[in-house]
């Protein structure tokens, strides 16, 4: 009976507000302690165990190096001194990291913010820096799920699974899922007609920007679509020997099954393990 009452209480507005306040307090405390924790991790790196997180400049876990971009613009609030490799992933230059040197590379909800060209480049660089049999764990929004939700006019799915800056309509939700174009720029009737008449990939490519202007680009916006077919294509082209479709916290690596990884809930995410 008590458990039933607790279950009912968890769905009340009052509980949700209390939980938000609690999470805000915890996150503020974590943010305050983060620089000290990160510095201790850096000072105690193992030279025999090397892990790399690509795209999360606030990650803190033993033996995990960070690759992210701490620019001098107000849009970037990562501290460069706490990032091991300060690299703009939109650049197509070789990463200044030694080949065959990392055991694991992890990237969560990062690559979809890049152009297709830079995603392909990142796959090649990650494969190069991994040790033989090393693992690349990738989590990204799955465009196949969003495409199906838009087909079914399922606004509730987007409200649950998407983190769109523009929440004004199902059109804006869907567009934000794979493109950095503003929903006000598109003709909704033409958008719907293209969706219904064009092949899926042709439609998606029509509404993404193949080039990004660094002077105006905001990295919190999605810029590309990704599904498992694309992961297989890019992974094979980069030289990975195995590409495994996975699920949340079910990586083949025990290290990557920790709750610190695959932390975004919902059924709109794609998970994959790629083995060198």
Image (cartoon, rainbow, N blue to C red):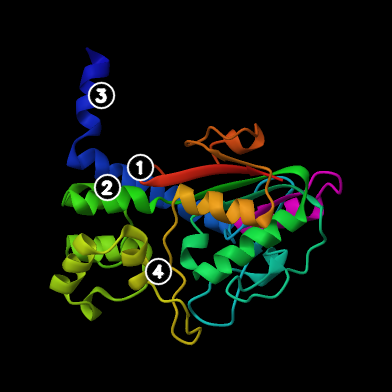
Residue that label 2 marks: 160
Q: Quadrant of the N terminus?
A: top left
Q: Nearer the viewer, mark 2 or mark 3?
A: 2
Image: 172 above or below 163: below
Residue 192, image x and y in percent?
Answer: 17, 65
Cα distance between the residues tagged 4 and 1: 19 Å
Q: Residue at x 49, y 54 (%)?
A: 230
Callout 2: few (<14), some (14-19), or many (20+) C-alpha neighbours within 10 Å? Answer: few
Image: 223 above or below 36: below
Do the CB atoms of the residues marked 1 and 2 lie less than 8 Å apart?
Answer: yes
The residue lying toward the viewer, choosing from 35 and 54, is 54
The residue lying toward the viewer, choosing from 172 and 83, is 172
Residue 225, image x and y in percent?
Answer: 41, 61
Residue that label 1 marks: 266
Residue that label 3 marks: 6
The residue lying toward the viewer, choosing from 33 and 252, is 252
Cα distance between the residues tagged 1 and 2: 7 Å
Q: Residue at x 58, y 58 (%)?
A: 58
Q: Which mark is residue 221?
A: 4
Q: Secondary structure at mark 1?
A: loop
Mark 2 or 3, nearer chain start? 3
Cα distance between the residues tagged 4 and 3: 38 Å
Mark 1 or 2, nearer chain start? 2
Going by the image, does 185 lie left or right of 45? left
Q: Nearer the viewer, mark 3 or mark 1?
A: 1
């Amino acid at each position: 009976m008590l458990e039933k009452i607790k279950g009912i209480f968890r769905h009340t507005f009052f509980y949700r507000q209390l939980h938000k306040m609690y999470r805000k307090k915890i996150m503020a405390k974590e943010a305050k302690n983060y620089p000290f924790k990160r510095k201790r991790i850096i000072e105690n790196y193992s030279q025999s165990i090397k892990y790399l997180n690509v795209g999360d400049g606030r990650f803190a876990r033993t033996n995990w190096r960070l690759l992210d971009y701490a620019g001098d613009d107000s849009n970037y609030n990562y501290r460069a001194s706490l990032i091991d490799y300060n690299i703009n992933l939109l650049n197509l230059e070789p990463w200044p990291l030694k080949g065959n040197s990392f055991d694991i590379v992890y990237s969560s909800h990062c690559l979809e913010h890049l152009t297709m060209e830079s995603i392909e480049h990142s796959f090649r660089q990650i494969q190069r820096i991994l040790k033989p049999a090393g693992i690349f764990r990738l989590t990204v929004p799955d465009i196949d799920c969003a495409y199906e939700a838009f087909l079914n006019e399922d606004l509730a799915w987007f409200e649950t699974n998407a983190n769109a800056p523009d929440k004004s309509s199902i059109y804006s939700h869907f567009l934000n899922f794979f493109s950095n174009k503003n929903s006000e720029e598109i003709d909704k009737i033409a958008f719907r007609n293209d969706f219904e008449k064009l092949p899926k990939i042709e439609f998606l490519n029509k509404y993404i920007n193949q080039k990004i202007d660094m002077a105006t680009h905001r990295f919190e916006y999605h810029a590309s679509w990704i599904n498992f077919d694309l992961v297989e294509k890019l992974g094979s082209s980069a030289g990975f020997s195995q590409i495994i479709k996975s699920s949340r916290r079910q990586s083949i690596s025990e290290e990557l099954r920790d709750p610190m990884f695959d932390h975004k809930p919902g059924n709109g995410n794609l998970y994959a393990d790629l083995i060198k």
